[in-house]
Amino acid sequence: MNREYRTIPSKILKQPLEMLVYGTAGKPVMVFPSQEGRFFDYENFGMIDTLAPFIQSKKIQVYCVDSTDRESWFSQCNPADRARLANDYDMAVKTEIVPHIRQDGHENAGIMAHGCSFGAFHTANFALRHPDAFDSGIALSGCYSIKFAMHDFDNANVYNLDPLRYSADMAGKDIVKKLRENLLIVCSGQGPWEDWTEEATKMCSNLRDADIPVLLDLWGYDVNHDWPWWKKMIVYFLGKFDRAGFLHSNHCMTAEQSRDFLLNFHSI
């Protein structure tokens, strides 16, 4: 399998953004690490080995990006600076990493966002805030509000990076037209340590109220918050994307494809 270490200079963050890239072609998948994690965690927990058949058959090309969680949401600086730094990360990914991926053989593609646990929080934000760049997302076992990290502090940056909150106010906004062409999958178990199913359910309800395509798939009470289950989940959903014909280098979701996928999900 082709594996490359890359660094992307970031003028916004004033530091290089590190990533690992796997494969040479296929649907571009941007993977966000879990809370305070690093770009190499996805491989270290065995997820790349799990996805090897998709990567080696050139159905997906995986870009594992770094996070700045430790410097932003979970740092010790004051809350306003933490939220500002989180917004800087959002803009660095959108304006510096996304163009790099598009120039890497995906000029006409929509990027799939993906992450587990707090990586699912990032997945929801990028899929919902930047639908011109991300046409799909697979969010596994995520929290969807940042309130637990910010406590009583609130400002515009906190609100705009809190999917549970802003999803309730999307109806009628211009961004909804583009989001209706895309697809977000939200999956979680209901077993030990899966503490955010209520947030997932409410966010998805908000999105449905705005007529935004979303699939909420809650697995059983034996399914806990851990990597063995996330391996099963991602293979399950990528298999359905593959059978639907979405996994190639320049695929970009359409409203018709998204609608048909949701209508026929169980038979795909």
Image (spheres, rainbow, N blue to C red):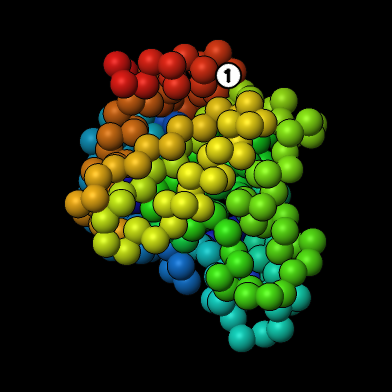
Residue appearing at x 67%, y 31% in the figure: 210
Q: Position of residue 79 (x, y in %)?
A: 70, 78
Q: Residues within 10 Å of mark 1 (few under 14, many from 20)?
A: some
| Total numbered labels | 1
Question: Which residue matches tag 1?
Answer: 254
Q: Position of residue 60 (x, y in %)?
A: 38, 34
Quadrant location, the C terminus:
top left
Quadrant location, the N terminus:
top left
**In the displayed structure, would residue 166 be above or below residue 193?**
above
Residue appearing at x 31%, y 37% in the figure: 55
**In the displayed structure, would residue 78 be above or below residue 133?**
below
Residue appearing at x 42%, y 52% in the figure: 197
**In the displayed structure, would residue 182 be above or below residue 202?**
above
Q: Secondary structure at mark 1?
A: loop
Left or right of 261? Residue 162 is: right
Q: Position of residue 84 (x, y in %)?
A: 74, 69
Name the amino acid, label 1.
Answer: Thr
Decide which of 212, 239 is in the foreground and name it: 212
Left or right of 27? Residue 173 is: right
Q: Is residue 167 visible?
A: yes
